[in-house]
Amino acid sequence: MPKINILDKHVAELIAAGEVVERPASVIKELVENSVDAGAKSVTVEIMGGGVSFMRVSDDGTGLAFSEAPKAFLRNATSKTLNKEDLESIVTMGFRGEALASVAAVSKIEMLTKRPEEKTGTLYRIGGGEEISHIETGCPDGTTIIIRELFYNTPARLKFLKKDISEANAVAAVVDKLVLAHPHISFRFIRDNKIVRITAGDGKLYSAIYSVFGKQFAASLVPVEFSGQGVKIGGFVSSPLFCRGNRTMQYFFVNSRPIKSLKIMAALEEAYKSCIPTGKYPACVLVAEIDPREVDVNVHPAKTEVRFSDENAVFDMVYFAVKNALLNAQNVKEAQIKMPEYRPALFSESSSSTEKSAHQQVLTPTLNASVAEFIVNKPLTAESEELPTISETPISEHTAVSIPITERVSSSVHIERPPPEISQTPNPYRLRIIGELWKTYIICEEDENLVMIDKHAAHERIRFEVLKKELTSSSQLLAESIFMTFDMRCYDALRQGREVLLDSGIEIIPLDNYVIEIIALPAVLTGSDVEAVLHEVAEIFAESNGSEIGTEGIFNEVLHRIACKSSMKAGDKSLISDLETLANTVWNDKSIRFCPHGRPIITTINRREIEKNFGRA
């Protein structure tokens, strides 16, 4: 049997540090949470070189006394937990007493701190877990911690860090979450000597969202407010018309703590189930307030996961909060559509107060009194869950091919004539159209076979092939530039991939505050849903490193998205003539058997198989 050894204290500290300090972003998270717990109203985060070479976090919190400074760097030392009873109701961000000790074990630290009632402050230096100096000095109220040479004594950890730009983006993502979690605190984020984020700290979540994600995203949000069963849900969710291709814009907070929760995510997406297409995901900033005794935050070293005592109650409250918000927003939209009909009466001096009250009721959405009343008295019908209809005007022959998602008026789109790119040439091998199943599959008969065709997948593949033929390396200058705001990760990815985009006909200019100006686009992209496509392209760059994708790869992805957005959709109402043309085009072109995403388009069942099921064969 191997001999059991007691680890050296220094080695044990390095191993323990690995549980808390994964990268510069995790250090920033721990330090800012300490500032929050210290009652700070203003926090400044500064990094250089991705945070590996230099990090500084300054706050105007309560600070530490001279004698307390060394204790803060001892393991299991904390001012936030006294006994085991305190663990049953944790209200602070940090409580383990491991953060500073872990950071000090793998870096060189300077801490300047001063309490408001004291005349002088404290300068404390520590490196590799060993104290270097501890002296009095002059400094402002609060605490400033400077960290240099992260992982200088653990080269094995250092080599696994990513490029500086990736580490800096990870820090930015952490800062953004903290901004959303604590809108009452004014944050300032400085990256490589450049201020990239300043927030008001006015206590309003919407202001924090606006600061982080910009005007376009904030304008697409629907407010959420609901409570019951000891849970209060607030925040904002995206309108069904502005959902995204992934879950990167879903932010969840419990008692001001950023968390990951599959339960809350499932409840959110269940509320959108009949409102958005498959493969699209809502964006949100949802805040849950729950009795601390009903939440266990001590289940993960990084405190990013929590456990609820009643997960079903949390699921129900999130679901009904989001569903009610969407229905409420739909009622408001419908009232706005009807507004011109009532405008003369609303603003006429001769109209009576009774008339005004009646008209105002049309414009005032109402929430249900309780979850029980919501379920019993106002069931969610198929009609109530449809998106608000803005216009019933049929789509003309000029717009039938390219339909931006922001301009699609409802889930039922009537196409006036067959899409022009579908072949109209007579062919001796024609299918007999029987009908349409679930507004999704075209049912056809061909000799001794039953043929089923996925209309969306088929039309998408045809559109994709046509767009590929139209693609040229030339681009068209836009009459008016398009301005889009991205998160830091996507912004940097697009900035690095400018040459690849330019080769593909997309010309961009990176501006300040993570704004991208689009000045030229290829002909196939003009008139399509540019904003949605560019957001998804940005995600492709960010996830796959745009410089390694290449022009062909990135533009194939762009064309996939254009083709998908401008094709017939499952659930759309379609003319039988459109379906017949589409079905025969697919049947007579053997190359059209899979959509651009690889899903099958067509399947056949022969007569023998069918008759066998009825006992005739």
Image: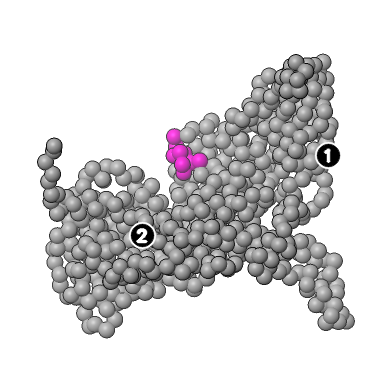
Q: Is residue 543 within the magenta segment?
A: yes
Q: Is residue 280 visible in this depiction of the protein? A: yes
The residue sitting at 22% across, 50% down in the picture is 15
Question: In the rendered structure, which segment of residues is drawn in magenta?
Answer: 540-548
Quadrant showing the N terminus: top left
Q: Residue at x 14, y 54 (%)?
A: 9
- N-terminal of the pair, mark 1 or mark 2, is 2
Relative side of 142 to 321, left or right? left
Reply above or below: 419 against 380: above
Left or right relative to 148: residue 380: right
Q: Is mark 2 on a helix, strand or loop?
A: loop
The kind of residue on which mark 2 rests is Asn
- Kind of residue at badge 1: Glu
* Quadrant location, the C terminus: top right
Q: Point out residue 433 in the picture as x, y percentages from the top left corner.
A: 82, 27
Front position among marks 1 and 2: 2
Q: Position of residue 510 (x, y in %)?
A: 50, 50
Q: Name the residue under label 2.
A: 298
Which image quadrant is residue 155 in?
A: top left
Q: Nearer the viewer, residue 81 or 294?
A: 294
Q: Which residue is label 1 attached to?
A: 416
| In front of the other: 102 or 391 | 102
Outermost residue, right side: 350
Main SS, magenta region, reads helix
Name the side, left or right, on which 304 lies relative to 574: left
Give the percent coordinates (x, y) of residue 452.
73, 27
For the question of whether residue 518 can be seen, the reply is no
Instruction: Tell me if residue 393 is in the magenta stretch.
Output: no
